[in-house]
Structure formats: C-alpha cells, structure tokens
Image (cartoon, rainbow, N blue to C red):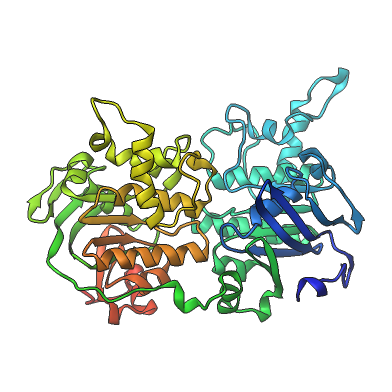
Amino acid sequence: MTLDQAPATDARGPFALSLQGAAKTFGPVIALADGTVQLAAGEIHALVGENGAGKSTLVKILAGLYHPDAGEFLVDGEAVAFRSVADSKAAGISVIYQEPTLFPDLTVAENIFIGRQPKGRAGLISRTAMRRQARELFATLGVPIDPDRVAEGLSIADQQIIEIAKAISLDARVLIMDEPTAALSGIEVERLFAVARSLRDRGAAILFISHRFDEVFALCDRITVMRDGRYIATHETSGATVEQIVREMVGRDIATLFPKEDADIGDVVLSVVGLGRAGVFSDIDFDVRSGEIVALSGLVGAGRTEVARAVFGIDAYDRGTVTLLGSRLKPRDPQAAINAGIGFVPEDRRKQGLVMDLTVARNTALTLRNSLARFGIISGAREREASEKWSNLLQVKAGYQDLPVSTLSGGNQQKVVLAKWLATEPKLLIVDEPTRGIDVGTKSAVHKLLSDLAGRGIAILMISSELPEVLGMADRVLVMHEGRITARLDRADATPEAVMHAATASMEGAL
C-alpha cells in the first residue's frame, strides 16, 4: 500500500484516526515531509523507522504539540486541527511515553484524577469515589495496583499502567505507546501486552512505536514504515517479514546489520581469574585479546552487567583478580581502570553515561578534562575541538556540538557516549547493551564501529541481550546463568540453540 493508495476508510467505516501527507518544517529543517498513518478501531498498529525518520514529529502532531504545515488530519472521519495537547485529549487521543511523568508525592488515584477529582456533597473532593473509580479502572485492565500507594518508588511498568488507566478515565479511544517496553523486564512486557490486547479487543486503536521487531510481530496487526520523514508502506503483519521491513526502513538488506570484519587477534589485554562476589557471581575466568570481540550473553539477571562493573571497578568483588596488559588492577577504583586504559559504555546511557543538561562537546570531553585544562581552566573552544574529532568519526550529526545532549535522538546519544570513551584511546572497551533503544540503521553504524575498533587492535567486551547481535558480532561467546559461565563458544560453534541451552543451564559439558 503506497500513499496514493491509502484508503480513507477501512472495511468497518472511517478510521479512528487518519493522518495523510503531513509536513512539518522548522526553519530550513524538514522534520516531516510526508507523514501518513491510519488507525482502525480495534487494532494495534506499529509505527517503525530509524531515528530521524519522522516518527517523533508525527506523534507530536497527533498529540497536539505541533500543528502540521500541510496534510489531512481526520478523527472518526471528521477533519481536526489541534492547537494544543488539550485539543488532542478532548478528541480521545492519549500518549503513553517511555518514561511516565507522574507526580511522585501524590497517590496513584490522585495522579489518575488530578485536576478533575470526583466531587461529593458540598462540592468537596470525594476520596472514596476516587479510590473506587481507580480500583475499577485497574480491575478493567486486570492489574492489581493499590490506589492509595504513593507514586514515588513505583516501577516504570506500573507507572505506564497508571498512565493507561488515566487515559481510559478520559475516554481515550486512541492510545499511542511510544517505546513503552524499553525499560521493562520480560514479565513486565508480557503484562503490558496483555493490557494492550485487552484494550484492542474492547475497540481501542493503539499506535505502538518500537525498535524491537520481535515485539512488533508478536503484538501488532499492521505495520507502517517511515524513512527520511516520509511514509513508505503499510503491511498486514501476517504477510510481512523482518527482512522486508528492515529493507524499507533503511534501504538495504538485513545482512548489512552485522558488518563484522575479521581482525588480527593478538595478545591478552584483559585477564579475569576467579572473580567472585557473594550472591552475585562466582568463578568467573576469561581473557579478552587485542582485536577480539568477546560477548557476555545470558538471560536478564544472569550477572553479566555485575561482572562488567566489577572489572571496571565500579562494584566490589570478594575474590579473584583483574589484570590489564599484565598489571593487576586495584579493586573498586574506576579511575585506576581508566588510567590503565579501560573505557566503559554503561547500559543506561541517560543516567550513567551522560550528563543530560550539558552540551555534546562537554559530555564528549568529560574524560579529557585533565588533559584539556590549562591552569585549571578548560575553554569551550578546546572542548569543541576535542569533541569534533570523535563526533565526526562516529557521524554524530553536524551542528550538535553546542546543543544539550538531551535534545539528541537515542542513537546520537549513544554515539556521544562512545565518543567520550574513544577519546581516551582505550586498550579495552566494555560496552553494555550497545544498541539498546536505537534504530536499526544506527545499530548497523555502531556494529561497524565496533568492528573497526577491533580491527585497530582494541579489545572489546560486549554485553548484549540481543542474540542476533551476539552471534553477528562476537569472536567468542561466554554464556552466563545465575552468576556463572556455563558455556564458552567460538564463533563457529555459537548457534542460537547452543547459546539458549547454556543460558538456561540445560547444556552439560559445554565448558
């Protein structure tokens, strides 16, 4: 289905929401050139595309944050022109963001009904009615959440369910879920999917935005693809393939996602012997050589990140040794690890890898502060000069040096974290979930970078929960289960079956 062929209605009548040919520019920047998406009542519809494809701009138009410069926008077959978020909500549209913004000091019920609390006699707020209605909403969703609990400390998953309950209380008929599963565990994802399917079965139209193809194909009825700010195609999920969707998103085949080149593997750079921490991991032994990519694989909770943090000196360990280029590293001393030549790209780039309010240049130069300082002062010009070298290497978009890193896409933020550590010219680079939450095109760029770094002799320890990434990029795979290494697999022997058997401790004799 192309744009010219996109119908105005589906078989059941007008679409619950139809946006066709939408355009939005900001000065000379074209954020959206040809945005189209059409949602039917009673369907879950995926919107996919690389970072920069125009998805966020399209969502902001639907949410009333932006007014399109051109295009046709219909809700239930009637033309609309939103001038505010309130207009969008009044039309029955609600957005569930990746990171909800509840008021932490208010209760769950107060967050749901804030600004429109039910009133009792004498016009006073009826907390009894508010709690009752909140319980009814959660019963409808099939999720037991206490309406009287204070929001602070709730998991991201529970916060998202509260946002969905709030949307239902506002009679929302169109729900937009923007990367809702990025911070959720497997069990939490399944609960969210059950809620989404329940809403669909009751007639809601759901727009689901995700970079995870397994989720898209498991949950969604149709898929709309965008590229470079333009609508490309819409497919029935049952008739589409991952290879087809990737090709439409990035204009190339899926085989290019893992551009791993053979590298000359040299001497041991990192040696870990007998590393253990009570109740977390034990008997961890492995080496990483120059030019080699070693992947730590396993299920969530297997202890992979904990091992990486201990190697870098963030967390303590009870026994064992960590040696870099023949010199034993002092435990619990990240600065010593940095000085020795280790770089660490953490799993959570926003909270652990970046200072979100600082500029791209300043974030990139954070690891170079001592070398850039003159008489204790660092000039902005020196920061930008140091940053540009690495930003250009990683193809962070030009003109971003003086922008807060919070304004960048997830893919560009990840590139800035990588640039920050590459600027130290590390001998060993530890990367924890290097492509989590970024689009397929940027994933390919990160994979190409890791391959190039290995080709330059850098040793790489990669933690990844994505099995295709592990199999596509690693020279060797170390599989962990419950804090232990249960398999050591060369690239030729690392099959999906072998990795998953070891990750669930069902492989014997693999060591």
Left or right: 482 as drawn, with respect to 201 = left
Residue 338 seen: yes
Give residue 67's position: percent from left, percent from top: 78, 46
Expressed as whole percent of the image width and height from the top left, the position of residue 408 reads 52, 47
Q: Nearer the viewer, residue 84 or 70?
A: 70
Quarter of the image that includes the C terminus: bottom left
Foreground residue among 246 and 168? 246
Relative to 243, 477 lies left or right: left
The residue sitting at 56% across, 68% down in the picture is 213
Horizontal side of residue 64 vs 371, given as left or right? right
Taking the spot 80% from the left edge, 45% from the top edge, the residue there is 88
The residue sitting at 39% across, 66% down in the picture is: 447
Whether 448 is drawn above or below 104: the answer is below
Residue found farthest to the left: 326
The quadrant where residue 498 appears: bottom left
Q: Quadrant of the N terminus?
A: bottom right
